[in-house]
Image (cartoon, rainbow, N blue to C red):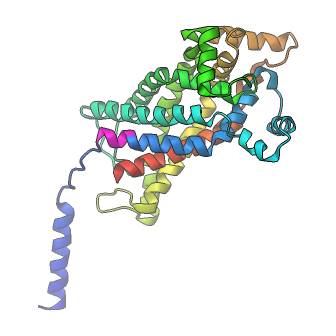
């Protein structure tokens, strides 16, 4: 056989292989989505707990206008033992891990179930690195919001415990058991769900916007990567390091944008959960904060609604990037 005929034969075989339909990928099981979400949530919660703690303290009513450096200095002064100073930054890690780990597991499982159901009727055709169904922007927004608001209600008790542990207003909380007993004794069942309105108004738009921005970023950045470096297999799916990098960058960008838009509700949620007697609900909290500034008091004004924005954006960008990258890589295998 001549070299020209051998070359043409190889060309025909390659063309036939490329023309075959790509094998259908079996969707990951529900248990795998749960385990992947749990793993990603626990990892991000433990690594980034100091940022969450500092963000909570910045948003306290008595901390408005104070810098992160001033808050850290005060923490250092209150704790004379050097080895305990660093440990202070991880105060509240247990309730935070329970909330973020279990919450992420339930959220990713619910989100996958919703996307599978919606995707069965409205799936968009696009090349993507994701193993999840590709939905329209409106469907991405809706499924993210519904999943996050639902799981947020289930996880509210751990959310309240987490915020109070992280603040400096509840030093008497020495264990989860004593904290739960204290809330039950003074506030009853309502105490475990205080601030859910502000939490839902924060989380539902955040999650919906996040999924929307995340999928859009993956689509745009994926096209750029494939166009510049040809990173991808024959079906256009991202592979290896390119896929992980795409997920990480998309997660960070989406989290930054969604966080900036929803920060005022995060401040209101924190105030209500820390001082439910002073801030009865979301509307009352917003009104009191704005009125406090007008009357010359501390902890108020429009600027207070953006307290902790820098810390929250940095923490959310890193945690979401880590969580979604690990989740996508585990699910896709």
- Give the residue drawn at x 50%, y 40%: 41
- Indicate whether 206 appears above or below 222: above
- Give the residue drawn at x 86%, y 9%: 295
Residue 99: x, y in percent? 53, 31
Name the residue nearer the viewer: 6 or 108: 108
| Residue 18 seen in the current view | yes
**Where, quadrant-wise, is the N terminus in this rendering?**
bottom left
**Where, quadrant-wise, is the C terminus in this rendering?**
bottom left
Give the mark count: 0
Name the residue nearer the viewer: 223 or 244: 244
Residue 164: x, y in percent? 67, 24
Magenta stretch: helix, strand or loop mostly: helix
Q: Quadrant of residue 144?
A: top left
Residue 219 highlighted magenta (yes or no): no
* 230 sits left or right of 170 in the view: left
Residue 74: x, y in percent? 85, 35
Q: Which residues are magenta?
A: 29-34
Farthest residue, direction left = 1
Farthest residue, direction bottom = 2
- Indicate whether 183 appears above or below 213: above
* 249 sits left or right of 13 in the view: right
| Residue 216 seen in the current view | no
Name the residue nearer the viewer: 330 or 124: 330
Residue 283: x, y in percent? 64, 9
Q: Quadrant of residue 96?
A: top right
- Give the residue drawn at x 70%, y 15%: 275
């Amino acid at each position: 056989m001549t070299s020209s005929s051998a070359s043409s034969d190889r060309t025909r075989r390659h063309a036939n292989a490329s023309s075959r339909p790509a094998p259908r990928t079996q969707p990951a099981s529900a248990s795998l989505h749960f385990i992947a979400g749990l793993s990603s949530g626990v990892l991000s919660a433990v690594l980034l707990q100091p940022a969450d703690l500092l963000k909570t303290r910045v948003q306290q009513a008595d901390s408005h206008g104070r810098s992160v450096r001033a808050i850290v200095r005060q923490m250092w002064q209150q704790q004379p033992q050097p080895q305990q100073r660093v440990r202070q930054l991880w105060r509240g890690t247990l309730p935070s891990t329970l909330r973020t780990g279990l919450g992420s597991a339930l959220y990713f499982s619910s989100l996958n179930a919703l996307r599978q159901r919606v995707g069965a009727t409205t799936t968009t055709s696009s090349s993507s690195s994701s193993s999840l169904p590709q939905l329209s922007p409106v469907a991405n927004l809706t499924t993210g919001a519904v999943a996050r608001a639902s799981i947020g209600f289930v996880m509210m008790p751990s959310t309240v415990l987490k915020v109070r542990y992280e603040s400096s207003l509840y030093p008497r909380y020495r264990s989860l058991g004593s904290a739960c007993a204290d809330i039950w004794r003074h506030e009853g069942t309502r105490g475990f769900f205080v601030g859910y309105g502000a939490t839902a108004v924060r989380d539902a738009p955040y999650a919906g916007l996040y999924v929307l921005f995340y999928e859009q970023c993956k689509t745009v950045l994926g096209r750029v990567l494939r166009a510049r470096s040809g990173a991808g297999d024959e079906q256009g799916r991202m592979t290896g390091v390119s896929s992980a990098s795409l997920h990480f960058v998309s997660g960070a960008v989406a989290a930054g944008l969604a966080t900036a838009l929803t920060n005022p509700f995060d401040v209101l949620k924190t105030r209500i959960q820390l001082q439910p007697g002073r801030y009865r609900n979301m509307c009352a909290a917003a009104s009191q904060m704005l009125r406090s500034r007008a009357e010359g008091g501390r902890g108020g004004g429009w600027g207070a609604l953006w307290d902790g924005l820098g810390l929250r954006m940095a923490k959310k960008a890193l945690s979401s990037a880590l969580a979604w990258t690990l989740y996508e890589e585990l699910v896709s295998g």
